[in-house]
Amino acid sequence: MNTKNQKVFFQIDEHQKIKETVARLGNAPATEDSHGQDVGLSIFESARKSVAEHADQTRLNPAIAIMDVILAAHRDYNKAVLPHVRNLRKNYPNLTINGLDKLLQTYPTALLFKEIWGHNDDQKFQTLKSVVAKILPMLQGRDDIQNDIEKTHDWAVNANLENYKEDPIGSILNIGVATFQHMRMSFGANVVKPDQRVMEILEREFGRKLEGINAILACEEIAEICGADFSPLLIDRIFVRYGSGYYREKTNSETYIVGVIKKLKASSVDLEIISNATGWTYEDVQNV
């Protein structure tokens, strides 16, 4: 557990029902909308596959993992982020964090940096610059991916959730607890990210309306109740995949963006401009 003062969200007489609920969610088939897009697998299989691939895909290149995390905040990941992350992995397979810092200096505005990560978003661009600036001292002057992996992993597993706002990365403007946890997760920590889907699952399936650190602790407790085969990270993956695949309603932020896109299209705003402003791909803007 990540905090000193342990809370209990579930009573002992609820434990069997919790195990059954997790089994029901996990045995459901992944859908086209499920995060991970593993159609043909169960949610369990998709989640376990994701956990197994976790170190290979994210910790393999921490520089790209940083961009992935920052782009993912408040976005439809499959539509607005994943295509760009795939391009980053293809175009910059050996990018170090020092190399990312040099790219930020070479492309010093959000508009220019769009050439690198596919988004023209000044807030995300400034957040990226701040995160890189905080991580560079951790690298102790070395410029190689293995060192990036080791140092970011050390930070991730030792970061203090309870006092995350005092952490070098947690203290950055626009880094909330969900992004903080996502960053730790991407650097190899076995943690939960309390995003919209996780909170929806806790409320709909377990009757607990929680957010932030309390949502994290509740998921950790569920993992403990389910036994040694379930880690907090696996519970996170199960919840996110089920929620994205079976809760058809869009989140408030997604609904708002769709509404904005429709209004801009009705006003004959160029689709490329809309794509740049929202972070959605050109094709997804066309389909709204």
Image: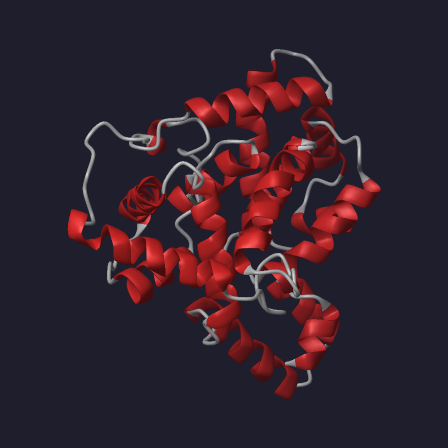
Q: Nearer the viewer, residue 12 or 255?
A: 12
Position in image of residue 30 (x %, y %): 58, 64
Quarter of the rendering containing residue 80: bottom right
Residue 101: give x, y in percent of width and height: 68, 30
Q: Is 203 above or below relative to 14?
A: below
Return the residue nearer the eye: 75 or 185: 185
**Residue 118 in view (yes/no):** no
Q: Quadrant of the N terminus?
A: top left
Residue at image position (70%, 49%) is 85
Would residue 35 be seen by someone viewing this image from the given angle? Answer: yes
Asked if residue 244 lies left or right of residue 142, the reply is left
Q: Nearer the viewer, residue 90 or 48?
A: 48
Dividing the picture into quarters, in which one does residue 280 lie?
Answer: bottom right
Compared with residue 222, is residue 240 higher up or lower down, i.e. above or below?
Answer: below
Q: Nearer the viewer, residue 195 or 26?
A: 26
Residue 230: image location, x then y, percent: 43, 42
Q: Is residue 1 above or below residue 234?
A: above
Q: How many marks?
A: 0
Q: Quadrant of the C terminus?
A: bottom right
Residue 4: x percent and y percent?
Answer: 23, 27
Which residue is at a point 24% across and 50% down the rendered structure image? 15
Residue at 53% x, 72% y: name it.
257
